[in-house]
Amino acid sequence: FETETVKLARVQLGASSMLPTHRHERSHLIVALDDASLLDDSQDREMHLKAGEPFWYSQALSHSLKNTGTQEISLITVDFK
C-alpha cells in the first residue's frame, strides 16, 4: 500500500534469515505481526518484540535486519515520505 505520504509493506523473514542492507530516507516504523527476535546491524541491537508491538526509528538510516529466532516472522514496515 502506498500513498503520497506513506508506504506500507509486509515483510516475511524465515528463521535465521536476513533482509539485505537497505536505506530509509526518513523515520519509519516496524510492527511485529508475530513474536520476533531481531538483530539490527545499524546499532548492533537485538530487539525482542511481541506480536502487535511497534518499534520506531526516529531518523534516516541504512540497515539490515536478521531474524534471530527459530520461527518465520512477519512484520509491517511503515515508511513516511
Image: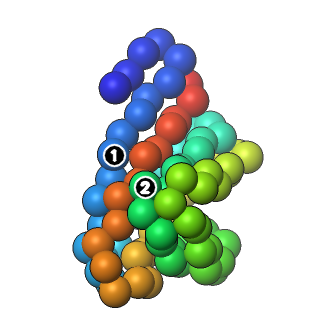
Q: Amino acid at mark 1?
A: Arg
Q: Are marks 2 and 1 in contact (CB under 8 Å)?
A: yes
Quarter-of-image position of residue 46: bottom right
Instruction: Give x and y (percent) for residue 9.
Output: 36, 40
Instruction: Give x and y (percent) for residue 81.
Output: 55, 25
Q: Residue under label 1, please give it.
A: 10
* Left or right of 77 on screen, residue 40: right
* Left or right of 27 on screen, residue 39: left
The CA span between labels 2 and 1 is 9 Å
Residue at the image point whose x is 70% and y is 46% from the top: 59
Q: Is residue 69 above or below residue 80?
A: below
* Left or right of 67 on screen, residue 28: right
Q: Residues within 10 Å of mark 1 (few under 14, many from 20)?
A: some
Labelled disc at residue 23? none
Q: Residue under label 2, please give it.
A: 33
Q: Residues within 10 Å of mark 2 (few under 14, many from 20)?
A: some
Classify mark 1: helix, strand or loop.
strand
Q: Amino acid at mark 2?
A: Leu
Instruction: Give x and y (percent) for residue 10.
Output: 33, 46
Query: Which quadrant would the N terminus be assigned to in this image?
Result: top left
Query: What's the image's color scheme?
Result: rainbow
Residue at the image point whose x is 48% and y is 71% from the top: 36
Q: Is residue 41 visible?
A: no
* Left or right of 12 on screen, residue 51: right
Q: Is residue 64 above or below residue 55?
A: below
Classify mark 2: helix, strand or loop.
loop
Identify the mark nearer the N-term, 2 or 1: 1
User: Of the residues tagged 2 and 1, which is closer to the observer?
Assistant: 2
